[in-house]
Image (cartoon, rainbow, N blue to C red):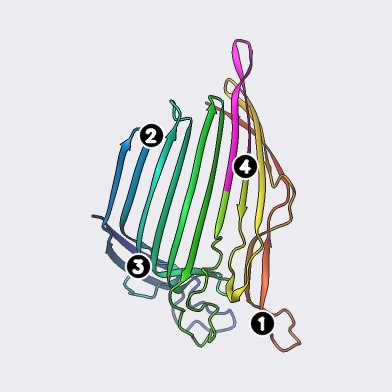
Amino acid sequence: MRGDLLFYNVDDRLGNFIPVYRPESYALGYRRTAFGITGGPRGSVELSPLPWLTWFSSLGFGYRSAQARQLEEGERSPFARVFSMETGTRLRFGKREQMTLTLAAYRTSLSQDLAFDPDEARLERIGPTTRWGGVVYALAKPLPWLLASVSLTAVRATLNAPPPPTVEDPTPAFVEGSRLPFVPPLLLRADIGARRDLLRWRDQPLVGRVGMGFSFLSSRPLPYGQAADPVPLLDASAGLRWVWVEVGVQLFNLLDRRYAANEYSFVSDWSPDAIPSRIPTRHIAAGPPFTALGTLTLHL
């Protein structure tokens, strides 16, 4: 059995802000307090019928806390109730567990999910959602100085009910069954690294390390039925350590790909003299180009 208690006290000193050309006729600032409590029972089972095999399952309730900017004065803290269940197995190979393979499947339901609203520059409630997914994770250490891992996550996140229309937004971007925006259906990550003694100098080992990582985000759903471009990225690092001094280099976006770190779809218009358009437009925040960083680390 679990229980969670949340208390908010927001002192917004820019609330009720009065322009300099108007007389002060009311108090500046705006304060909001909210309080909430919720229970979250959860159970887990783990069995190892064989030395190399483990099966695990869990089931329970949880919560997602409210965003402070969404609270009203005296409002009972609106928890988003979460119901989740997962099951999976873990396989170990080799006398020294030189390889571990983990397979898992999960389902999560939220009573009230959130999505980023570019117009408001904050997370907004969009309604209840459900996520189905699975994870495959492999970790291998074929040699004492070599380590490799790969993980693949697949998820299908959908909206169970659309948000109600409002005066500000009479035609919401989401409908029942819509894919949850900004959640990639596939996420792949692969890493390989090596660390070993290269030689001895003044009776102390000179340790070298090198590593490489690859990330892939599949096309992510966007509001109004659009989709973001997939993002593949390759990073690398290397270093040398002697006693307590280590020098290294980190390389990001090794292939210098042009990509969007974030993509959005919303109505915007940059023509002050024309009739404002109500057609959603794609917007991006460009990802960083090839970047090399040198490091100096002192191990004390």
Please tell me how crowded label 2 is: few (under 14), some (14-19), or many (20+) other residues with Cα within 10 Å. Answer: some
Residue occupied by mark 3? 79
The numbered mark, 2 or 1, whose residue comes first in the sequence reads 2
Question: In the displayed structure, would residue 250 be above or below residue 2?
Answer: above
Q: CA distance from mark 4 to mark 3?
A: 37 Å
Q: Where, quadrant-wise, is the N terminus in this rendering?
A: bottom left
Q: CA distance from mark 4 to mark 2?
A: 28 Å
Please tell me how crowded label 3 is: few (under 14), some (14-19), or many (20+) other residues with Cα within 10 Å. Answer: some
Residue occupied by mark 1? 279
Q: CA distance from mark 4 to mark 1?
A: 39 Å
The numbered mark, 3 or 1, whose residue comes first in the sequence reads 3
Identify the residue at horizontal 26%, vertical 57% (top origin): 41
Quarter residue 66 falls in = bottom left
Q: For residue 86: magenta?
A: no
Front position among marks 2 and 1: 2
Q: Secondary structure at mark 1?
A: loop
The numbered mark, 4 or 1, whose residue comes first in the sequence reads 4
Q: CA distance from mark 2 to mark 3?
A: 40 Å
Q: Secondary structure at mark 4?
A: strand
Front position among marks 4 and 1: 4
Task: Name the residue type under label 3.
Answer: Phe
Q: For residue 192: magenta?
A: yes
